[in-house]
Amino acid sequence: MNKKHITYICGVLAILVSSLPVTAQNINADEIDASVRAAKSNSIMFRSSTPEEQIQRQAYEEEMKRRAEYEQEMQRRAYEEEMKRREEALRPVNLFGNSLKIFAEVNGEIITSQDMQERVNAFVVTTQIPVNEQTKNMIINKVLEAAIDEKIKLQEAYKNSVVISEAELDKGVQNFADANKISVPELKRMLRKAQVNEAVFRSQMKAEMAWVRLVQKKAAQNTTISQTDIDDAIESIKKDVQQQKFMVSEIVIPKKKAKDIELLVENLRYDPRFELYAMQFSESLSAKNGGRLGWINKGQLALPLEKAILKMKEGEISNPVLYGADYYILRLEKIYTPGVDKAPIPNEDEIRKMLENKKLEEIAEKYIRDLRNKAIINRKA
């Protein structure tokens, strides 16, 4: 019955009712109540459910309850695993015993086993990558290289009269705490629990802050981006979106340091933090970006690497692939297919920023590489 029919019937009923004399005597409430209760309605609001419908509804409600309980259980397990990992990460591990040994000498300044132990503890508490059989040797190597770079950066800062004040250092520590969503007192408690001297943590922070200032100073006259650079980049991007491509992340380990690479791959397959491992262990320029290479066109990668990528599904991690003097561990993030997927083209400001960052990274990498080559480094352990 449509709306017009309903309106017409209601109008007729109104006329009929209004033509009848209505008094209290005319109304029998009991009869009306009985007739209403006896009336059967086809409305879904009043119709009783059939036994089959009641069974279906009960089954549906039970299924929804089971799903909710399952989701809660998965969340609980994930939380417990995260807490367990954090607890494991915060547990100090004595790797070098109690005797004091010299690990390395950098331009006359020494790095001792105590320096190494505290920096290993700092590495673990800040990255939450646990020390285990899969990661131990790689963490030690990473920490030693970082300690050497720390010496080189602080020495270069002193040579160039770059000074980080205590107030600036305090601000840097505050920014670090904010980025990790903890307070500075909480950070200090974490360091104490992990047996990390606060002075060691501040020294690492100071070296990085001084290094940023050094690179910015050196890059000030070398990061000019012209309109031609931007136009060329836009044209290149427009052509690029017409080709199939893969979004890839990498961890690059030199062959001479790859003794534990199979263990690293094993670790990566149950720990989803690929970006963190790339930042800490990879020796590629992409390490600073968590190993992200961005979109790579089909045919652009070296043949052994592309063969590995073509066999992978999104989210998978490859076995180690030897190419040249390095092993590559690849993760396939996404696949882009022209005509199916859409790729937005960045605007001029975004392209300018991208080109400036690229130049800055290149300058920083060359700077530290040159300093390492000039430094007198004697590794003793």
Image (tube, grey):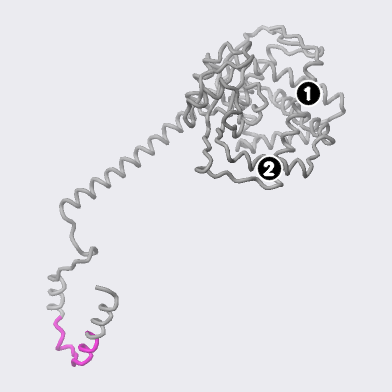
Q: Dividing the image into 4 quarters, which one contains the C terminus? A: top right
Which one is nearer the viewer's eye here, 26 or 47? 47
Residue 107 counted in the magenta span: no
Residue 211 position by quadrant: top right
Residue 23 counted in the magenta span: yes
Residue identified by numbered label 2: 235
Q: Residue at x 25, y 82 (%)?
A: 10
Which one is nearer the viewer's eye here, 82 or 160? 160
Residue 153's disc number: 1
Report the amino acid beneath label 1.
Lys
Q: Residue at x 15, y 52 (%)?
A: 51
Query: Dot 1: what SS?
Result: helix
Q: Residues within 10 Å of mark 1 (few under 14, many from 20)?
A: many
Query: Dot 2: what SS?
Result: helix
Which residues lie in the magenta part?
A: 13-28
State yes or no: discs 1 and 2 in contact (Cβ < 8 Å). no
Residue 172 position by quadrant: top right
Q: Position of residue 278 (x, y in %)?
A: 60, 25
Report the amino acid beneath label 2.
Glu
Spatial CA distance of label 1 from label 2 is 39 Å
Q: Relative to 236, is 378 above or below?
A: above
Residue 276's disc number: none
